[in-house]
Image: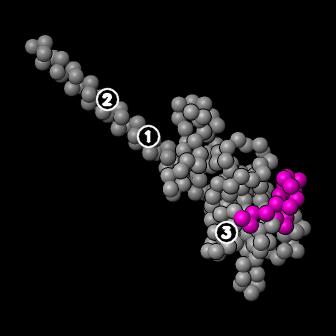
Amino acid sequence: MIILILILVLTVRHTREKEMVRQFGVQQVTVARETAARLEQLMLLVKKNLMTLSGEPDAVLRDGRKIGAVHAGMEDKVSYTAVTDVDGTVIVQYPPDIGPRTVSFGNTRLFQQVMQTGKPDVCVLPLPDMKRNIGRPLAMGTPRFRPGGEFGGMMLASFPLTAFDDDAPRLASETHSSWLLDGCGMFLFYPREE
C-alpha cells in the first residue's frame, strides 16, 4: 500500500512539474513574440524614415535640418543618422557634433551590400553613439539613387540593440533576458555578461 502511495505521489509530482515547464515555455514564447514585434516596428519606422530622406537632393540633406527633424522623429530610439556619397564618405551626420568629420563607410559590409543590391540592409556596425549606450549598435542602411537611377550613396541609422526592448536593461539584471541572433545564429544582443 505504501508503495502505491509513493508511486501516486511521484506521478502527481511529475505531472505538475511537466505542466510547469510547459507553462514556462508558453510564457517565454509570448515574451519572444512581443520582443520580435517591437523590433519589427522599430525597424519599419527607421526604414520608412530613411527611405523618405533618401529621396531628398544633396543640397537639402547637407543643410542638416531635414536629417535632424527625421532623426528626432524616430521616437528617440536612433542614436546616429548619416548620409553618404557614392564612395561611402559621410556628407552629413546627425547629431552633427558626434565623431570625426571625415567618416567613411565605403569598406563596410553594410555599404557594400546596399550598393550591390540596391536594397536596404541591416548589420551590427560600430558607430558613434551620442547616448553612450553599452553594447553593439545595430545599423540600417538604405540606398540613395540619383535622378538617372544610378547609386548615389547610402542613408544610415544606428541604434543600440536595447532600443527595441525598453525592459532589456532592467531584465538584464534579473533572471530574464532578451537575446537577438542573426540569420547565422551569431549573438547580436545578450544583455548579461556571463
Question: Which mark, by number, is residue 98?
Answer: none
Q: Which of the two discs, 1 and 2, labels the residue nearer the N terminus?
A: 2
Viewer-closest of 57 and 15? 57
| Camera-nearest residue between 62 and 41 | 62
89 falls in the magenta region: no
Amino acid type indicated by mark 2: Glu
Residue displayed at 32% across by 34% down = 19
Residue 85 relative to residue 109: left or right: right
Earlier sequence position, callout 3 versus callout 2: 2
Q: Residue at (73%, 74%) from the top-left corner?
A: 144
Residue pictured at 71% horizontal, 84% vertical: 149
Q: Are marks 3 and 2 in contact (CB under 8 Å)?
A: no
Measure how far apart labels 1 and 2 are at the Cα level: 15 Å
Q: Mark 1 falls on what kind of element?
A: helix
For marks 3 and 1 on the same chain, the one whose residue lies earlier in the sequence: 1
In whole angstroms, how far apart are the C-alphas of marks 3 and 2? Answer: 51 Å
* Residue matched to label 2: 17
Foreground mark, 3 or 2, reads 3
For disc 2, the neighbor class at 10 Å (few under 14, some 14 to 19, many from 20) is few
> Disc 3 designates what residue?
112
